[in-house]
Image (cartoon, grey):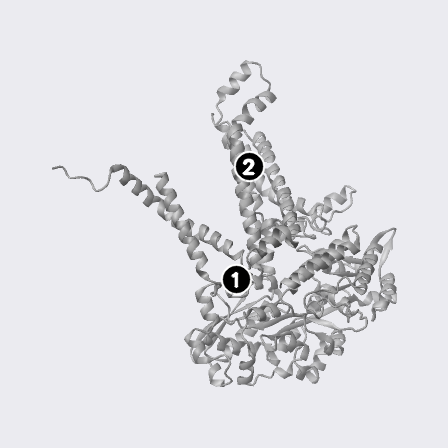
Amino acid sequence: MEKKPFMKPRTVSAVKDFVCVLPALIFLAIFTYYPICRLIQISFTDWNLLNDRWNYVGLKNWIWLFNGSGTKHLLNSLKVTILYSIGELAITLVGGLIFALIFNRMNAAFSFMRAVVFVPKYVAMSSAAVVFLWILNTDNGILNYLITSLGLPAVDWLGNRNTALLSVLLLTGWRAVGYGMMIYLSAMIGISKDYYEAASLDGATAVQRFWKITIPMLSPTTLFLFVTTFISSMKVFQSVDILTKGGPYRSTEVFVYKIYLYAMEDFRMDRASVIAIAFFVLLLIITASTFKVSNSSVHYDS
Amino acid sequence: MKKMLSVVLTAALGCSLLSGCSGGGSTGGRAQQAAQGGSGDEAAGGAASADPSAYEVTEPITIQWWHALEDQYSQTVAEIVEGFNSSQDLITVEATYVGSYAQTNEALVAANAAGTGLPAVTVANTPYVAEYGAGGLTEDLTPYIQATGFEIDDFGKGMVDASSYDGKQVALPFLISTQIMYYNKDMADAEGITIPEKWDDMDAFLEKASVVNGGATERYGTIIPGWDQWYFETFYLNQGVKLINDDRVSTDLDSEAAVGLVNQFRGWVDKGYVNWTTMDSDASSNMRQAFIDGKAFSVIHTSSLYNTYVDKCDFEVGMAWLPGGDTKNQEIGGCVLLIPSKNDQATKNAAWQFLSYLCSKEVNMKWARETGYIPTRNSVLQTEEGKEFLKEKPAFQCIFDNLDLINPRIQHPGWNQLSTIWKNYMLEIMVEDVDIPSKLETMVEEINEVLEDA
């Protein structure tokens, strides 16, 4: 009699797959899901970071956030973070695309220039921020030196609420634009020359080729850059911490910095938790919406 | 397979949820055990005992000291630590520069919450004492003081109070400073500018000390640091404004006197007499540079920077007590030293020895001579040593004359939140074209809410 196998081949394969995924699952459970659960738990307590014990306070923190004095700060952080994200997205996508179009030549000189644009990505944010502190200094910074040399008045870049966020964007844009350029460049190289040749034969101009071939063929890359840049820009912290510390008067108080202030300056882990959860849910919704919208407008056929 | 994975994922999530919710009102078993004195060391030592043998160090031990003393003090730090390490055989101290006071606070509360990686001794900026004391982060040093006969009475009362919470000595005064007005003495002599002693003298002083031409300020009368309310809070206190009312849940910052002060500040800013600084990272260095370059007649800053100002300025730097109102009190700044209570008893004992050394008269005088911090010991201030110190640093006379007027900081668990709200609104009022009464009303509502909930 033929021996019956212990498990069906499909089951064996499924178990093998599962074993391969298990380490990642354990990692995620410990470092992602567990902290999220604790965060939800803390949001229903009155935990002060300095205390070992807490009490459950029901929805008090949630009411504070959505129907109390916290609402104003939530809306301010939301506005500042979205403004910042729009700025960084514009720099990364538009700036990256422009640089990619300019440097899309394969020779040594252009390789060098591409490297020059890309290198800031590898400069540590903290070091770059300190250098930008000097550049943007009102009295002794080189930027104001140039501006005043042209006869214009000096600008209080970091101390004025109209320019503080722009100053933070200058730093992050300087670092991010090279990354956008490299991603676009690699995608441009992947676009078949046949499309351009066919379009040229049909009499399409360079501008038409750009709008009708390049832009649509780059749409998966644009989506990728949009989603990754958007999420990373929503989580901006270091540049704000070093350059403006959320000021002047909360005009650069982005979400993550606000969470940090509540947790580490005020020791209010309870309030930090509710904002963190609200932020997490917001990111989830925005990311899901992005993918939903992109299904109808992204061309994957290259 | 997809289905199986989702089942496992759900199970993993469920498990983590269960474990996440099983803390039952505690931040962690280990930390809790330490806080409750569950370790054997603690039981043997007994933090409440006054028996000197309970605080002796019997085994070799290496301990960490966290400080916030920047590079210019590194030589002094190294010499003092070396002095302690070579003075005995059992304890080796490793000094670590953690960063600014805010960064040190951040590292300390994080280590405390985790219950691991704590230093044996750390500095802490004075306003943190109340919150640390209320949260139980600090070891009560009273039994150590009693058991070892440490001369706590030799410190000024204000300093002892500033390092106590709820009647417990939770820290010791270490590097103490106060708010002060630095002024350009050469300029004052040349132009006959009188330094204001009373708040009512400020208008005349600022008019004389400022140089404004055609609406543009060429020289500010003074610069007020907007990045830290410590620098302007005594102006309020001396006008009788209670930053925290006796009920402990409300502020007086919308009272007539408080509104009057805000209007005065704004008026001076509008006239170009006063520069209210921003809160960004280089605001402090910008302010210093303006003074050094002669673009400001005076600045309000901490007395601890006396040496720095003297070294950088090519004119004589004067120091003046801030102008007073009904009173002319000031507040303690700088830092205290404390021992985190979650350390084991052997570490605490070694920490106490090092802490006593750091706060000893000789070491304190070394700090005072080599930095701008104030000598903390009464026995120094009233003796030949004090006279010698004043010979070296005559500008400190104004501090020595008013030592009894240096008070502890306001202690309230919601103080940090209050100060953040206050300084943000003050800057906005000074810089933007806003309706001052309505801004103050919103500010006070926000502060009251924080105080009630602290």
Which residue is depicted at the point 81% across and 65% down?
A: B257
Which residue is depicted at the point 58% across and 24% down?
A: A210
B422, A232: nearer the viewer:
B422
Disc number at residue B110? Answer: 1
Specify the farthest residue to the top: A202
Residue A106 seen in this snapshot: no
Could you tell me which chain the residue with mark 2 belongs to?
A: A
Specify the farthest residue to the front: A58
Q: Which residue is mark 2?
A: A226
Classify residue B407 as left or right of residue A224.
right
Q: What kind of residue is marked 1?
A: Ala
Classify residue B214 as left or right of residue B121.
right
Above or below residue B322? Residue B4 is above
Disc number at residue B354? Answer: none
Instruction: Work out how far the residue at label 2 is from the one at label 1, CA to CA, in angstroms.
Output: 34 Å
Quadrant housing the N terminus of chain B:
top left
Q: Position of residue A251 (x, y in %)?
A: 68, 49
B39, B5: nearer the viewer:
B5
